[in-house]
């Protein structure tokens, strides 16, 4: 008989890698993954109804005593590509490294996001085997391309919207249980995303007539493009405290020492100074107080001795609550201040609406955190820095939250989308209990 850890490792070994160009995706691996889920979780597939959406996404319905106000538990099947040579251990072998409390599973997707997906199924499987019937319907929504387009999640939302379903609580991947993220705060905090930043890709293009590199013009296209990128870098978006960040600081203020407690409790006066400090405390803290913009892709001439007729740069912009795709584009245009550099929004979505951090839905999350993960953990609102599939669910629910129920160290968080992704076995097993508590309270 297999254990939860055995099942987790088996699913981690299936490389369900997504690519922006979906013609490069090995869909047979997703079919293998779905077949493994059906085999490993027989009670779930006996009790819950399952349907395939958008070709590869999975939507399960657990019929409860009341169909109204359902719970939606989200995760995604796909993982980002790997550079195997960078990994200390093979990324799709799911090796357990270390002993005791330090034993960790090393694999792509261990945290992002098969950790949540499998933990959800473990909780549901055990309850289904026990004969439990939820008070309200429970849906499991597992998208297949969260790391790229998110089309699977959008399609799932379309299905639910067409059926008139309005969830009372939606929870997806997001913040985790962390230590020491907020300066001066030593208690562990469960960072529950009540909103997430918007995301957009802005393409910059500079053009020229071309020719031989031995006779360049005074301002070649590459130099014009470099100047535009440099201006964006030297003139970052202004700092400010958005509503979710204000709520976070207010919540953790009682757990901060003086004089920091007074600083967090008087943000109307201390806000400008605090944002200036946060901006210098590293990428994470900087990103919660401003919209960020960074050039991620560059292209120029096809040969090293050829002038580029077209020089392009992709700028990834993450929008702080209150900014929009339109306002960020206009600001970039003003900062670049060069009419010969073309700006084009390729992809863009505004920041999500902000879900409340008071009320029944919030209490359910906080109670599950306390009972499953630790009574000493402070549950706090949080602004999620990255985008997730949950943003599409805000059209059918006012209570959409982003939280991964694992106690993660800084190095573990840094490994997301990088090499040596891993999760400690004990930490992952506790996460199962969080989802069980949510379902029991459904």
Image (cartoon, rainbow, N blue to C red):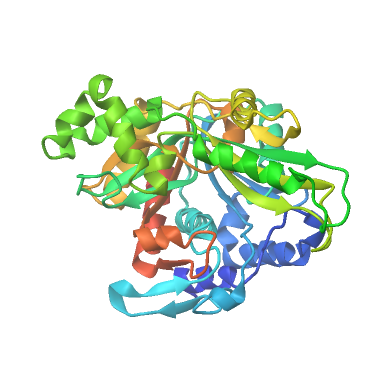
Q: Residue visible at 22% across and 30% down?
A: 264
Q: Would residue 305 be seen by someone viewing this image from the given angle? A: yes
Check the image and report above or below for 368 versus 299: above
- Most extreme residue toward the left is 258
Count how many numbered circles sit on residues in the image. 0
User: Which quadrant does the C terminus fall into?
Assistant: top left
Check the image and report above or below for 68 versus 284: above
Drawn side of residue 126 relative to residue 377, left or right: right
Drawn side of residue 408 relative to residue 174, left or right: left
Drawn side of residue 6 relative to residue 184, left or right: right
Q: Residue visible at 26% across and 51% down?
A: 180
How far from the left and from the top, in percent, is residue 415? 47, 63
How far from the left and from the top, in percent, is residue 441? 39, 39
Drawn side of residue 126 relative to residue 324, left or right: left
Check the image and report above or below for 44 versus 35: above
Q: Would residue 1 be seen by someone viewing this image from the given angle? A: no
- Most extreme residue toward the top is 268
How far from the left and from the top, in percent, is residue 251? 26, 32
Task: Name the quadrant containing residue 228.
Answer: top right
Task: Name the quadrant containing residue 330.
Answer: top right
Give whichever of 287, 433 is nearer the camera: 287
Give whichever of 371, 86 is nearer the camera: 86
Q: Residue visible at 82% across and 59% down?
A: 214
How far from the left and from the top, in percent, is residue 328? 59, 28
Give whichever of 106, 73 is nearer the camera: 106
């Amino acid at each position: 008989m297999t254990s939860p850890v055995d099942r987790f490792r088996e699913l981690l070994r299936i490389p369900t890698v997504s690519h922006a160009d979906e013609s490069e995706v090995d869909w047979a691996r997703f079919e293998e993954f779905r077949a493994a889920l059906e085999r490993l979780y027989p009670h779930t597939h006996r009790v819950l109804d399952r349907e395939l959406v958008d070709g590869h996404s999975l939507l399960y319905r657990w019929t409860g005593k009341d169909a109204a106000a359902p719970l939606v538990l989200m995760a995604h099947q796909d993982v980002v590509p790997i550079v195997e040579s960078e990994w200390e251990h093979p990324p799709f072998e799911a090796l357990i490294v270390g002993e005791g409390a330090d034993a960790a599973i090393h694999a792509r997707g261990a945290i992002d996001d098969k950790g949540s997906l499998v933990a959800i199924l473990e909780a549901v499987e055990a309850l289904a085997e026990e004969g439990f019937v939820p008070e309200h319907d429970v849906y499991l929504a597992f998208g297949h391309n969260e790391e790229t387009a998110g089309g699977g999640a959008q399609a799932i939302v379309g299905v639910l919207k067409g059926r008139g379903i309005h969830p009372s609580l939606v929870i997806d991947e997001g913040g985790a249980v962390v230590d020491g993220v907020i300066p001066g705060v030593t208690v562990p905090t469960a960072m529950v995303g009540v909103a997430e930043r918007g995301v957009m890709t802005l393409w910059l293009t500079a053009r020229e007539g071309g020719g031989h590199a031995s006779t360049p013009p005074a301002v070649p296209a590459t130099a014009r493009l470099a100047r535009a990128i440099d201006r964006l870098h030297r003139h970052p978006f202004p700092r400010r405290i958005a509503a979710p960040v204000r709520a976070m600081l207010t919540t953790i203020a009682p757990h901060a020492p003086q004089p920091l407690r007074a600083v967090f409790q008087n943000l109307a006066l201390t806000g400008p100074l605090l944002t200036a400090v946060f901006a210098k405390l590293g990428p994470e803290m900087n990103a919660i107080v401003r919209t960020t913009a960074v050039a991620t892709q560059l292209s120029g001439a096809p040969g090293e001795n050829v002038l580029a007729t077209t020089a392009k740069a992709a700028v990834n912009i993450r929008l702080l609550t209150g900014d929009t795709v339109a306002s960020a584009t206009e600001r970039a245009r003003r900062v670049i201040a060069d009419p010969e550099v073309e700006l084009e929004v390729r992809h863009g979505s505004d920041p999500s609406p902000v879900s409340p951090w008071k009320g029944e839905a919030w209490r359910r999350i906080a109670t599950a955190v306390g009972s499953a993960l630790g009574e000493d953990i402070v549950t706090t609102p949080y602004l999620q820095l990255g985008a997730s599939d949950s943003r599409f669910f805000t059209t059918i629910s006012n209570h959409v939250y982003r939280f991964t129920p694992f106690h993660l160290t800084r190095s573990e968080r840094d490994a997301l989308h990088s090499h040596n992704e891993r999760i400690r076995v004990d930490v992952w097993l506790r996460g199962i209990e969080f989802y069980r508590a949510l379902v029991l309270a459904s």
